[in-house]
Amino acid sequence: MVSREELQWQNDESIIKQADTITDAIRSIQKTIRSKSEKVVKKYGFTPPQLRVIFYLYETPSITLNELSEHVMLTKSTVSGIVDRLYNKGVVIREIPKDNRRTVRLSISEDFKKNNNIHDMKKLFIYNLIYNGIIKMGPIEVEKIIYGLKQFSLLLENNDWK
């Protein structure tokens, strides 16, 4: 007969193996995304984080550095460095509102928008990363992936660290 402690230990071992499998899958996804995105971004001369900033500023002009940092999920100092480099390339403009001189609003420059089809850039970026893969799957399988990823995200958000 198996004792309660032995059952708990076996259960813990099983959970540890599952956690390792999930961690390995996440690392593999990150590696693949990084590799595929680097191929696309070379075409435009930007890094993947720079393109994320460009895409978000295109969709949401006149936002603050804090708002941008939260959306792209990078630290404020990292985003500040990205914005500085994009500003120096003439991609981003900084606007200081007259009613609040302490705030800086960020947007994509009109020259950059005029000379680049940002919508097509994003479409190609997303197409090469995700679309090519999910187009080969059925809609039910894709919905299962989306559901699972959302559930896992919620699980991580609601998990209290000990």
Image (cartoon, grey):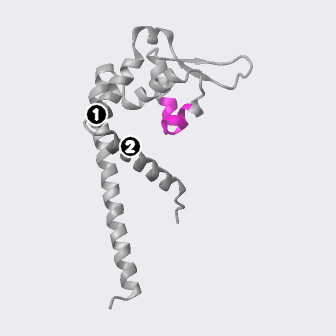
Q: Nearer the viewer, residue 90 or 161?
A: 161
Q: In the rendered view of the protein, which quadrant contains the N terminus?
A: bottom left
Farthest residue, direction right? 99
Residue at x 37% of width, y 81% of height: 7
Q: Which type of secondary structure does the marked residue at label 1 adopt? A: loop
Residue at x 38% of width, y 73% of height: 12
From what the image shows, is residue 49 above or below residue 7? above
Left or right of 148 in this view: 28: left
Q: Position of residue 140 (x, y in %)?
A: 34, 43
Q: Which residues are magenta?
A: 68-81
Q: Nearer the viewer, residue 58 or 85?
A: 58
How many other residues sit within 10 Å of disc 1, few (<14), some (14-19) or many (≥20)? few
Q: Position of residue 156 (x, y in %)?
A: 48, 55
Give the labeled residue for mark 1: 135
Q: Earlier in the sequence, mark 2 or mark 1?
A: 1
Give the labeled residue for mark 2: 143
Q: Amino acid at mark 2?
A: Glu
